[in-house]
Image (cartoon, rainbow, N blue to C red):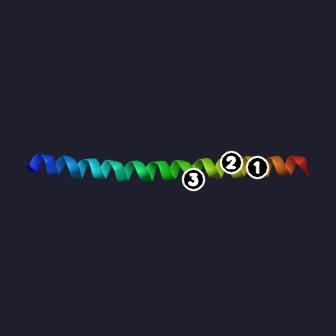
Amino acid sequence: MRAINVSIIVAATLALAACNTVSGAGKDVSSAGKAVTKTAEDVKN
């Protein structure tokens, strides 16, 4: 029984860590996209 509880806690922790990692990666990609857009607008003008 204790092993199951520990497994559930570990799985939940890993799931939360993965969500934070994906969220951070999304923000990085968004920032890169904004930088490319700004550069393209600067070149266009």
Inspect the image, locate mark 1, and give the three-letter code of the amino acid beneath it. Answer: Thr
Q: Name the residue under label 1.
A: 37
The reply, left or right, for residue 10 in relation to residue 28 is left
Marks 2 and 3 in Cβ contact (< 8 Å): no
Which numbered circle lies on residue 33?
Answer: 2
Inspect the image, locate mark 2, and give the three-letter code of the amino acid beneath it. Answer: Gly
The reply, left or right, for residue 45 in relation to residue 36 is right
**Quick one: SS at disc 1?**
helix
The crowding category of the residue bearing disc 2, from other C-alpha atoms within 10 Å (few below 14, some 14 to 19, many at least 20), is: few
Q: Which of marks 1 and 3 is nearer the N terminus?
A: 3
Marks 1 and 3 in Cβ contact (< 8 Å): no
**Quick one: SS at disc 3?**
helix
Q: Distance between the residues labelled 1 and 3?
A: 15 Å
Q: Could you tell me residue 11's position as x and y percent?
A: 27, 47
Inspect the image, locate mark 3, and give the three-letter code of the amino acid beneath it. Answer: Lys
Which numbered circle lies on residue 27?
Answer: 3
The crowding category of the residue bearing disc 1, from other C-alpha atoms within 10 Å (few below 14, some 14 to 19, many at least 20), is: few
Q: Which of marks 2 and 3 is nearer the N terminus?
A: 3
Marks 1 and 2 in Cβ contact (< 8 Å): yes
